[in-house]
Amino acid sequence: MNENRKAPAPPRRKRRRRPGKFRRALHALSRAVLLLLLTAAAIVMMTIFFKVNTISVEGAEKYSAEEITNALDISKGDNLYLWNKMKVQEHLLEKLPYLDSVRIRRHLPDALVLTVTECRAAAAVKAEDGSYYYISSTGKILEQSTSDGGLAVVTGLEGAQMQTGKEIAPQTDAAVSAYLEIMQALSEQQMADDLQFINLQELTDVRIGCGGRFDLRIGAVDSDLSYRIRFAQTVMSERLSPSDIGRLYWDDEGRMHFVPETAEEVARSGSVSGAADAMNTIAQNPDGENGLTDSQKNNAQTSTTDSSTTDSSDTTDSADTSDSTDTSSDDTTYYDDSSYDDSGDYSYDDSYDDSYDDSDYSDESDYSE
């Protein structure tokens, strides 16, 4: 009979009761309240204990520490954290234009440290009212003054928007982009300090005055700009004598020419436009056309036609042109040397010699940076 008895059923596992909706809501509310209390406590602690007590400035020369702290949107007693660092930096850069960068650090429990770098005026642009805007090499408008301050004067930027503390937007004018590219190339060759002028009135005939001695005519600002600046620097420093003054230009075949001129003629190139100077340029170029752009050649032909109808009694300009023509016989041509490199190793004698043989240098048409 024992064999017919059924085995006892296994004990049934007790089902775990899940919390109801009310209990789940209560737990969520408790967590939210706790988080809110912790946040409020943190804010109260920051407000009470982390207040600005000292502000120090590092790296300033143009502005005093007092000027910078007064221009700051933060004062002593303000909270050390409850403000937007990016907006404070932007406001300071705009209010004090000569500041190039600002770094703000918080030092607990109550100090702010500002580390600044300053920019300097690289050039001046004449405004319509006769005043001048000082601009940095990166195009930031630094201040407005009644004089050029002895800075290099840039012509051709008169139509650009000028607002102190702001930067000229390159997209507003092709001349602005040309200025920025030229300043970068000059800085790379450490030539920015010798800048006398930049003439951007005709972007196919850009002119750069260097050290009061050289009128560097680089043509259009294109991909060859850095190379042309670098090669011109080599010619000016190593292939011309310290007493040489004149014009350097490239002809249609990529050859560089040097034509002796006076310091006054070099300075004049910084203000006169290429169209107005086309006749004078043709008189000075030994080949009559090389070194001129197509627009200059067309303008020159127009100027020739117009001049034939002018009063022949005006002899002043013709005298000036004849004086310039006399110097054309001293033209010297420089070729790109295939052995050229940044080390500046040249066997060429630095002294200027009229009998210089151009065959020592071969034109490297496939030159790449």
Image: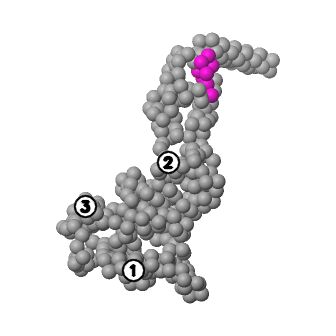
- Determine whether, in the image, residue 366 is placed left or right of residue 321: left
In this picture, is 220 found above or below 137? below
Say which amino acid is labelled 2: Gly
Label 2 vs 3, first from the N-terminus: 2
Q: CA distance from mark 1 to mark 3?
A: 33 Å
Secondary structure beneath dot 1 equals: helix
Where's residue 3, x and y in %? 65, 17
- Residue at image mark 2: 149
In this picture, is 214 found above or below 58? below
* Of 109 and 270, the residue lying toward us: 270
Camera-nearest label, 1 or 3: 1
Disc 2 packing (10 Å; few <14; some 14–19; many ≥20): some
> Which residue corresponds to the image point at 50% horizontal and 21% vertical from the top-left?
107
In this picture, is 305 found above or below 239? below
Secondary structure beneath dot 2 equals: loop
Camera-nearest label, 2 or 3: 2
* Of 38 and 162, the residue lying toward us: 162
Where's residue 245, x and y in %? 34, 66
Disc 1 packing (10 Å; few <14; some 14–19; many ≥20): some
Q: Is residue 362 magenta?
A: no
- The residue furthest right is 22
